[in-house]
Image (spheres, grey):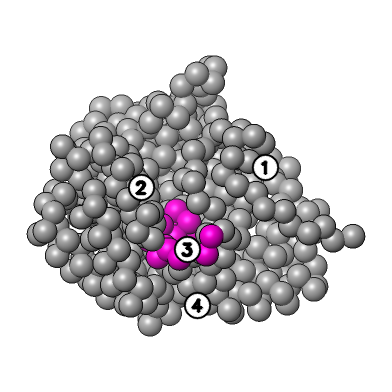
């Protein structure tokens, strides 16, 4: 029996869904490319990319074909079995990266949880049970599980949930001396985002990453790169670490990997893989055939010279448009980031009005995100057209004019 859809409104959210979020009044119901439409048929240019997820826009025709094809073969097998899409995807990730082995999960938080557990397990097995301290950075974000949110450096996300996991220390991002002051023989890992996302779109400096690698080598600690937001083409390379010339011991990806379908992965080396035995970690849905088929197709499309070089060209056009806007309104102090992960830093007098700016943008039909208290974040499709960029920026201009 197929039930007809009944119209639901924003009020239904308050009535039936726990208020962990506060969504805007409109509800998207359709997407194509870099445009979405709400229940009333209003069109929006989407510069949010589902928080850096819809790397190929909405409802990419090839991904639709892949999903339809796989849906007629097999949906789910659990971790009792492996499956062909998972094996193909794992091989593709290994051949495209520093890694030799892959673990699949469902979200960035799950991938990071696995990474942190593996780092501690490896240090315990190879060195000492006391070698379990993890160093992270203030303003970082690594997920919403109790472990990952505690490793993250924003107490507003981790307070009031009872005792936090022990053995976690925080240093200042891009300040190597603060790391040197706390690292010791009991440090098992250093974890960082190469671009702090939720913390305000702040890239790590090359010298900082290089010195972290040296410290990890010195203290037999693992270097973990959280590329949940930067991986799979977002910065103009398949992985952001390629910009730095430094390889991690463990890397996590999610978001753009599935282009909207939930999937994540943890990548690591044969040295670390050597301590793993069946049963020490797992997930029911990780490596799902549907998700892996979509992810494989996503990488096939993105990991090409045309798409990756196109990211740089699209960034140039966006910066050109933003600079024109800023000459008129003088709202921004800085535009930072890498590739199509862009942070627009507001003048201090406008910081408290950031949600008003987003509201006026919604009214004009253009969608942005925030990152921290003072940054408007852009993470559009990697294949957004020039016409969509220009139209979206025109709408942003009109929104700021009304603001």
Mark closer to the observer (2, 4): 2
Q: Quadrant of residue 258?
A: bottom right
Mark closer to the observer (2, 3): 3
The answer to whether one can see residue 173 in this image is: no
The residue singled out by tag 1 in the image is 281
Image point (65%, 63%), residue name: 291
The residue singled out by tag 4 in the image is 301
Extreme bottom residue here? 306
Extreme right residue here? 1
Q: Which mark sits nearer the N-terminus, 3 or 4?
A: 3
**How many numbered dots are placed on residues in this image?**
4
Which of the two residues, 164 or 22, is positioned nearer the viewer here?
22
Disc 1 from disc 3: Cα separation: 45 Å
Q: Which mark sits nearer the N-terminus, 4 or 1?
A: 1
Mark closer to the observer (2, 1): 2
Q: Quadrant of residue 350?
A: top left
Q: Which mark sits nearer the N-terminus, 2 or 3?
A: 3
Count neighbours of disc 3 (C-alpha within 10 A) and say few if under 14, some if 14 to 19, many if 20 or more.
few
Mark closer to the observer (4, 1): 4
Count neighbours of disc 1 (C-alpha within 10 A) and say few if under 14, some if 14 to 19, many if 20 or more.
few
> Secondary structure under badge 1?
loop
The answer to whether one can see residue 40 in this image is: yes
Residue 267 at x, y = what percent? Answer: 53, 56
Whether tag 2 and tag 1 are in contact, CB under 8 A, the answer is: no
Left/right placement of residue 348 relative to residue 148 reads left
Queried whether the magenta region covers residue 44, the answer comes back as: yes
> Secondary structure under badge 4?
helix
**Magenta segment:** 40-54
The residue singled out by tag 3 in the image is 42
Count neighbours of disc 4 (C-alpha within 10 A) and say few if under 14, some if 14 to 19, many if 20 or more.
some
The residue singled out by tag 2 in the image is 359
Residue 382 at x, y = what percent? Answer: 40, 70
């Amino acid at each position: 029996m197929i039930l007809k859809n009944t119209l639901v409104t924003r009020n239904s959210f308050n009535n039936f869904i726990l208020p962990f979020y506060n969504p805007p009044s409109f509800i998207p119901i359709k997407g194509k490319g870099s445009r979405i439409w709400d229940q009333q048929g209003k069109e929006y240019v989407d510069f949010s990319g589902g928080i850096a997820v819809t790397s190929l826009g909405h409802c990419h025709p090839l991904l639709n074909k892949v999903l339809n094809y796989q849906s007629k073969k097999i949906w789910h097998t659990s971790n009792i079995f492996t499956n062909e899409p998972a094996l193909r995807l794992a091989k593709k990730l290994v051949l495209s990266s520093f890694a030799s082995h892959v673990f699949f999960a469902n979200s960035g938080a799950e991938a990071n949880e696995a990474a942190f557990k593996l780092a501690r397990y490896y240090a315990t097995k190879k060195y000492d049970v006391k070698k379990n301290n993890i160093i992270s950075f203030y303003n970082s974000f690594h997920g919403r599980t109790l472990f990952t949110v505690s490793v993250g450096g924003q107490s507003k996300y981790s307070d009031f949930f009872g005792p936090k996991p022990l053995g976690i220390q925080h240093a200042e991002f891009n300040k190597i001396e603060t790391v040197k002051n706390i690292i010791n023989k009991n440090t098992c890992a250093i974890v960082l985002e190469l671009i702090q996302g939720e913390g305000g779109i702040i890239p790590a400096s090359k010298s900082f990453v290089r010195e972290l690698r040296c410290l990890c080598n010195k203290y037999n600690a693992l270097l973990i790169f959280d590329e949940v937001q930067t991986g799979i083409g977002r910065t103009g390379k398949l992985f952001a670490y390629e910009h730095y010339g430094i390889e991690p011991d463990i890397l996590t990806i999610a978001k753009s990997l599935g282009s909207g379908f939930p999937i994540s992965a943890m990548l690591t080396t044969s040295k670390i893989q050597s301590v793993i035995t069946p049963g020490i970690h797992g997930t029911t849905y990780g490596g799902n055939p549907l998700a892996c088929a979509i992810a494989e197709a996503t990488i096939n499309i993105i990991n090409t010279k045309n798409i990756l070089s196109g990211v740089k060209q699209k960034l140039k056009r966006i910066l050109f448009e933003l600079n024109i806007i800023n000459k008129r309104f003088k709202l921004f102090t800085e535009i930072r980031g890498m590739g199509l992960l862009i942070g627009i830093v507001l003048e201090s007098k406008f910081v408290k009005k950031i949600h008003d700016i987003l509201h006026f943008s919604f009214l004009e039909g253009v969608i942005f995100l925030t990152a921290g208290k003072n940054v408007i974040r852009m993470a559009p499709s990697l294949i957004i057209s020039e016409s969509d960029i220009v139209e979206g920026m025109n709408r942003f201009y009109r929104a700021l004019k009304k603001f």
